[in-house]
Each structure stands twice: as C-alpha cells, then as structure tokens.
Image (spheres, rainbow, N blue to C red):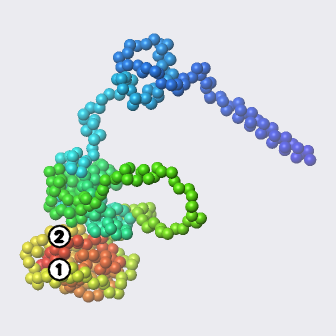
Amino acid sequence: MSKSLNLYAGSALGVGLTLMAAYTFADRNVADAPANPPVLAAAPAQLPSAHAPAQAAATASTDQAVGLFIGAAHADTMTDGARFGLGREALPEEVAAWNVDVSPDGTGLPDGSGTAMEGEPLFEETCAACHGSFAEGVGNWPKLAGGDGTLADADPLKTVGSYWPYLSTVWDYVHRSMPFGNAQSLSDDEVYAIVAYILYSNDMIEDDFELSRETWDQVEMENADGFIVDDRAEAEYAAWRTEPCMEDCKDTVEITMRATVLDVTPEEDTSPTEAATEMNHSNDAATVQPEEEPEKADAEVQEVAAEAPAAPDPELVAAGEKVFRKCKACHQVGEGAANRTGPVLNGVVGADIAGVEDFNYSGAMSSMEGNWTVEALSAFLAKPRDYVKGTKMAFAGLRKDEDIAAVIAYLQAQD
C-alpha cells in the first residue's frame, strides 16, 4: 500500500514541476505592450498638400497615429492634388514590358514570321507530347484540331479550328504560357511558326502560308461570329434582384437530368511522353475489339472516289503531294522508303489491308480483310478511327473531299 502512495506522490510532484516550468518560461520572450500605442483613427479633416512646409515634431507624431493606412484607404478620394510622396511615373520601356497582350486586330504583335512547315518540327519537339503530332490531343490533354461542325452537338469538341473566335488568343497563349513547364522559352519566330502549324492542322491555311503581322488579317477564324455580347446585366440581373417567392414550395426535390461526365483531367500516373508514345505508335496492340465489318464510306466520299481518274492527273498528284505532308511524320513513299511509325505506302492503292511485310500492325488493323480500294482509302482517310475501330492511329482525318482525292492520286503515282 505504501508503494502505491509513493507512486502517486511522485507523479503529482512531476506534474507540478512541469506546470511551474511552463508558467515561468511562457512569457519570458514576450515584450511588454507600449504605453501609448498608435491607433487606427479617423482620417484628418484636411490632408497635407504636396508642397506643405515641414511641421513640428509634435505635429508629425500626432499625424503618425493615423498612419499610411489611412492615406492608402483614402487615396482614391483625393481630388485636391494632395500627395504622399510615394512612387514615381513608370518609364516608357517599363510600360512596354508590362503591356505584352495582343489584340484581335493584331495590335501588339512583335516582328517575326513563320510557316506551318517551319512549325511542324517545333510542334513535334515542344508540343506533341501533350497535344499529339497532329494537334489531335493525347489522352485527356487538350485537342487543338478537329471538332468542325460539332458545336451544336450535345458534347461538342471545342478546338482552335471549331470554337476559338480570335487568332490573337492562340498567339498570346502560346507566347506567354507554352510549352508546358518551360514557358516563354520560344522566340517570336517560333511562336509564329507553331501557331501557323496549329492553323494548318485545322485546314485553315496552306503549309507555305507565312504568318506574320502583315498577313494576320488574312486568317479567318471559323467561329469568329459565334459569340454574342454579354447583356445579362441589362436583360437578367434585374429579375434576380426581385423578392424571391417563398410560398407554395414543392415538398420533394426530383433530379430530372445529370451533367455530362467531362473527364478532362489527365491521369496522374501517365506522363505526357508515355501517352504520346502510346497514341502515336500504331504497332501496339489495340485495346478495343474491331467490328466484324468496317463501316461503309459516306456517300459523298464514295462519289469523290468514283470520280478519281484511272490515270492520275499531274495537277492532282502535285496537290496530293502537298497534302501528304501531313502524313510524312509516320509514313514514307518513293524510292528508299522504309517503315516508320506507320508502314511504307508504296503501291498501297489496291493492295491488301495490313499487307506490308515486316511491319507490326495493331490488332485492329491486322484483323481486317480486303483491299485498299479507292473507296476504302477514301473512307479511311476521312475518318480513320471510325473506319478501323480500335486503331491507335493519331491522325484525325482529312476534312476536304478534294484533299482525299488528291492524296489518293499521289499514292497511285507511287505504284
């Protein structure tokens, strides 16, 4: 019993010593409050003028009570020329360094120029890891091309070509914020070239069009007239400020519709480089099983294909060579051509689908049967992912029927 009391006594003594030490050292480093601390008082009735003579020390001490906080709070109400002697006027070069935005009419653009051909390797090096080689987007990273005619759909694809109303927004954003993780590392010429490649990927300019301050107004944005002035302040705000009805409320609440799952955030466990590699290499196994029969070509595409002459027109072949530049990142033709990310395309017109030797096709492509007839090629070039279900080919397709016919003529000339 005595041992138990000794334990309690020791514990009580230890707690007491701890509390005493805490009380002793708690306020050791805390300074005493001043006798007459400055307070936040009302603003003086008359603010000092800019050239007022120096006042006595006692007056200055009194004015200090109101402090600079009062002056700052009333700075926007000073209309009699009173000043506090703070700051200076910005120099012209300082204003120019701050004013870096670009207006829709091109005001603010620097000197420089660039074409889509110059921008393609730059885009591949600095942008394709996230946005794809053809600006089609990798994974959930933003798509910059495509979406034509989808704005009225339930789930529209909003890209530079389909949605953005001003070209200046593209230039300004690339100039200030891209490439991701290394912003503002591009020269003005490189920005012009990359923007030109984005426009070219949306079939808005030719590959040799030189984008510059002088040619700025020659680019027509598809959705330039698709926005309206925000008049909610006049049309709606007044209705929101009326007294709300608080009578005859419903007893229950029923959910009638749910929002679309946007799914816009990229997965954290996949780096942009890995995603780009997965999307841009068609020799990986497909994750989606293809349908037994490919979809039939659209009527318009079939009509264009039917009009293609047996002997390719030289002018059409020349036009197709220009369009084929969109394919050169993955495919080669002509003498010395070899398989790259995609198979060599010599003699592809009329050849067996997935028939190039020594090329590892994706599961979706290798399971297809038939030949690359003009009709089949036309349908495939228009919408590759619709024609070959499950393909990982990154190219989104050609929008113009004349471009499809030209590319086929060019490929026929390579037989």
Q: Position of residue 123 (x, y in %)?
A: 26, 59
Task: Name which residue lies at 28% across and 69% down.
Answer: 149
| Number of the front mark, 2 or 1 | 1
Screen quadrant of the C terminus: bottom left
Task: Name which residue lies at 32% across and 28% down.
Answer: 88
Q: Secondary structure at mark 2?
A: helix
Q: Is residue 283 visible?
A: no
Horizontal side of residue 221 vs 153, given as left or right: left
Question: Which residue carries the number 1 mark?
Answer: 304
CA separation in Å, label 2 and label 1: 16 Å
Q: Position of residue 302 (x, y in %)?
A: 20, 82
Task: Say few, some or many: other residues with alpha carbon within 10 Å of mark 2 (under 14 / 14 to 19 / 20 or more).
Answer: some
Q: Secondary structure at mark 1?
A: helix
Viewer-nearest residue: 187 or 73? 73
Amino acid carrying mark 1 in the image = Val
Amino acid carrying mark 2 in the image = Val
Question: Which residue carries the number 2 mark?
Answer: 323
> Furthest-left residue in view?
314
Viewer-nearest residue: 20 or 6? 20
Horizontal side of residue 320 vs 43, given as left or right: left
Q: Position of residue 99 (x, y in %)?
A: 28, 41
> Furthest-right residue in view?
1
Q: Position of residue 43 (x, y in %)?
A: 48, 24
> Do the residues bearing badges 2 and 1 touch, measured as CB atoms within 8 Å?
no
Viewer-nearest residue: 194 or 9? 194
Task: Name which residue lies at 45% across and 52% down.
Answer: 240
- Give the quarter of the image for residue 92: top left
